[in-house]
Image: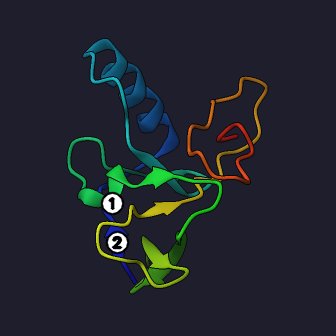
Amino acid sequence: MVIEYVGQTIRQVIADMREKRYEDEGIGSSYMFRIAQDAIIDATKCGNLARFINHSCNPNCYAKIITVESQKKIVIYSRQPISINEEITYDYKFPLEDEKIPCLCGAGSCRGSLN
């Protein structure tokens, strides 16, 4: 285990409203991670360092949703030993959509998009 991705658990309708509000406020990036059909962890304003972990098509970590005392949690685990000063990355596994989000991970096996 590397770190838990923490934030506030919200429903999809709230996530949609917050995403719009964050855009209107000029925040730019929101840090939301889906844990179930209608449950999302919003780490935008009350998260920890896990929200800053970048995507990679060839990551050294992976995210796993686990249940602890009936609460779903997101935990980032390492795939391999991680060296000092090595960037921690995982595959965001965004759903496929028509509008592609460019990937800039630089991996030799880069898919070209996050979705």
Q: Amino acid at mark 2?
A: Glu
Where residue 26 sits: x, y (%)? 27, 16
Where residue 100 sits: x, y (%)? 70, 28
Above or below, 22 against 61 in this view is above
Residue 32 sits in which quadrant?
top left
Residue drawn at (29%, 66%) of the image:
85
Where residue 20 sits: x, y (%)? 40, 20
Residue drawn at (47%, 30%) of the image:
16
Image quadrant containing the C terminus: top right
Position of 76 with respect to 24 (left or right) is: right
Position of 84 with respect to 70 (left or right) is: left
Image quadrant containing the N terminus: bottom left
Residue 36 sits in which quadrant?
bottom right
Above or below, 78 against 6 in this view is below
Q: Amino acid at mark 1?
A: Ala
Image marks 1 and 2: residues in contact by CB distance under 8 Å: yes
Colour theme = rainbow
Pick whichever, 12 or 56, lies toward us: 56
Callout 2 secondary element: strand
Callout 1 secondary element: helix
Q: Residues within 10 Å of mark 2 (few under 14, many from 20)?
A: some
What residue is shown with label 1?
A: 50
